[in-house]
């Protein structure tokens, strides 16, 4: 009986560490890896203690108190996330918007930065599609996410259309340009 305890303990440790690695990059409605919708700016140094944190104020506004973007890089230089706090110059502020840069971050349905439009429509209900000058913004309220698709990834007839773009007009294999979570 006592010889059975050691293999069970080792197996339990291995299973627990594997699930922690998966959660490190898991995206859900109120969580992205170790970040939650209640994480404050001052907690970022602790959460990303093995990574690099770079704070970049908007150009020309360094002294105006505008909201600064916070970029998270792994030590190997890979950009993971860009965070925008709700309030500028406030360590107790929570995060408002997160741009996901690394394909390591994915939700349970496999949606990540390398996904195509079909991956979104096959798994979620599109809330809105909004045109901008250079892209189309796809909003999915169900997961607090929005995605951009550059207009040059779309069929040419959609580039300059005055009409509203419908999901049916966007080819399923169209690659997304950016992936954001907003809290």
Image (cartoon, rainbow, N blue to C red):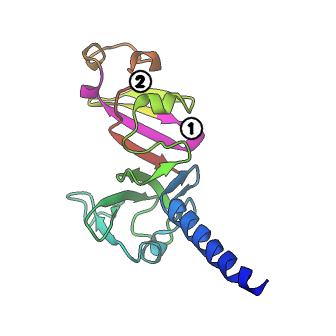
**Of callouts 2 and 1, the N-terminal one:** 1
Residue under label 2:
172
The location of residue 22, given as percent across then percent down, is 52, 60
Position of residue 6 relative to residue 177, above or below, is below
Magenta-highlighted residues: 139-154
Position of residue 108 relative to residue 118, above or below, is below
> Magenta includes 153?
yes
Classed neighbour count for the residue bearing mark 1: other residues with Cα under 10 Å, few (<14), some (14–19), many (≥20): some
The location of residue 52, given as percent across then percent down, is 32, 72
Residues 164 and 105: in front is 105
Relative side of 172 to 76, left or right: right
Which residue: 58% across, 49% down? 29
Residue under label 1:
141
**Secondary structure at numbered mark 2:** loop
Q: Quadrant of residue 44?
A: bottom left
Relative side of 18 to 79, left or right: right
Q: Quadrant of residue 146?
A: top left
Q: Marks 2 and 1: CB-CB under 8 Å?
A: no
The location of residue 151, given as percent across then percent down, is 28, 27
Residues 65 and 108: in front is 108
> Magenta includes 163?
no
Q: Quadrant of residue 137?
A: top left
Which residue: 34% across, 33% down? 175
Which residue: 58% across, 71% down? 14
């Amino acid at each position: 009986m006592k010889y059975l305890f050691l293999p069970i303990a080792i197996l339990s440790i291995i299973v627990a560490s594997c699930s922690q690695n998966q959660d490190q990059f898991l995206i859900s409605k109120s969580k992205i890896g170790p970040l939650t919708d209640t994480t404050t700016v001052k907690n970022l140094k602790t959460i990303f203690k093995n990574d690099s944190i770079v704070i970049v104020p908007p150009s020309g506004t360094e002294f105006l108190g505008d909201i600064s973007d916070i970029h998270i890089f792994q030590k190997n230089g890979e950009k993971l996330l860009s965070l925008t706090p709700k309030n500028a110059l406030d360590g107790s502020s929570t995060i408002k918007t997160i741009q996901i840069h690394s394909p390591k971050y994915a939700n349970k349905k496999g949606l990540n930065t390398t996904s195509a439009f079909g991956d979104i429509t096959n798994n979620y209900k599109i809330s809105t599609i909004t045109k901008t000058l250079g892209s189309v913004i796809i909003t999915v309220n169900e997961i607090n996410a929005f995605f951009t698709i550059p207009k040059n990834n779309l069929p040419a007839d959609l580039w300059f259309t005055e009409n509203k773009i419908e999901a049916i007009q966007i080819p399923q294999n169209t690659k997304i340009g950016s992936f954001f979570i907003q809290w």
